[in-house]
Each structure stands twice: as structure tokens, then as C-alpha cells.
Image (cartoon, rainbow, N blue to C red):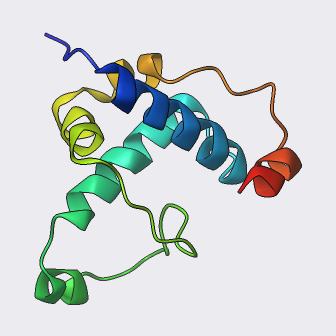
Amino acid sequence: MEVEVDPKSESELGLVSTILGCRENRDRIELARDLKEFVKKDDLTVDEKKSLTITHLGLASDYKLIFSPLLKQYIKDTSEPGLARSMPKYDFISPSLALIIM
């Protein structure tokens, strides 16, 4: 059963997916996977984060991403396909425009 997204989180997810999806050159399902991994790692303690073997810097590693508690919970509770379906299609925006918006 999929979780309903509240309007504030839906707007936040739309902004994040449009900007980061284009910036990171990820399709929606890849970005959904990245967001779930990001939220999972964000909940780790400082010591747990230090013990991870870093193979890549991760989603928007040169920015500090802060998600609202409602969006974080939605990302945790929703499957990857469900999360991808809740994102707007963002193929209309170029990576250059995404950088300008940021």
C-alpha cells in the first residue's frame, strides 16, 4: 500500500526532483533510489557515518540537503516506484537551467 504525500511535501519533492534530477542527470527511478539512500544515511550517527566506506560522494555532495520531517518520512515509507511516480516529469528543464535556479 502506497503512502499519500501531503501537499507541502509534494511541493518540496517536486523542487528537489526537478533541480537534483537534472543536476545529477538521473531519471526519476534512479533519483528515487538516491533519495532513499540519502535519507537512510542521513539518519545515521556521526560515528556510523565515519565507519562507512565511501565509494562515491553521493547525491548533491557539494550541498547540504535538509528535508522536512514529513518529506523524509514519506521517502522512507514509499517504495522506489511509488516515489518516482510522485515526482513531476522534469525532462523539460536543462541541467544548465537547474544550476541557474540553484
The residue nearer to you, when weighing 62 against 52, is: 62
* Image quadrant assignment for residue 46: bottom left
Outermost residue, front direction? 8
Above-or-below relation of 91 to 50: above
Where residue 65 appears, as percent x and y from the top left, is: 44, 63
* Quadrant holding the N terminus: top left
89 left or right of 83? Answer: right
Residue shown at 50%/41% (left/top)?
A: 31
Outermost residue, top direction? 1
Where residue 80 appears, as percent x and y from the top left, is: 33, 29
Above-or-below relation of 90 to 66: above
* Image quadrant assignment for residue 50: bottom left
Where residue 62 appears, as percent x and y from the top left, is: 58, 76
The residue nearer to you, when weighing 42 against 102, is: 102
20 left or right of 32? Answer: right
13 left or right of 91? Answer: left
Residue shown at 31%/46% (left/top)?
A: 36
Residue shown at 43%/19% (left/top)?
A: 86
The residue nearer to you, when weighing 91 against 71, is: 71
Above-or-below relation of 91 to 2: below
- Numbered circles on residues, count: 0
Residue shown at 63%/36% (left/top)?
A: 18
93 left or right of 86? Answer: right
* Quadrant holding the C terminus: bottom right
Where residue 88 appears, as percent x and y from the top left, is: 57, 21
Above-or-below relation of 34 to 7: below
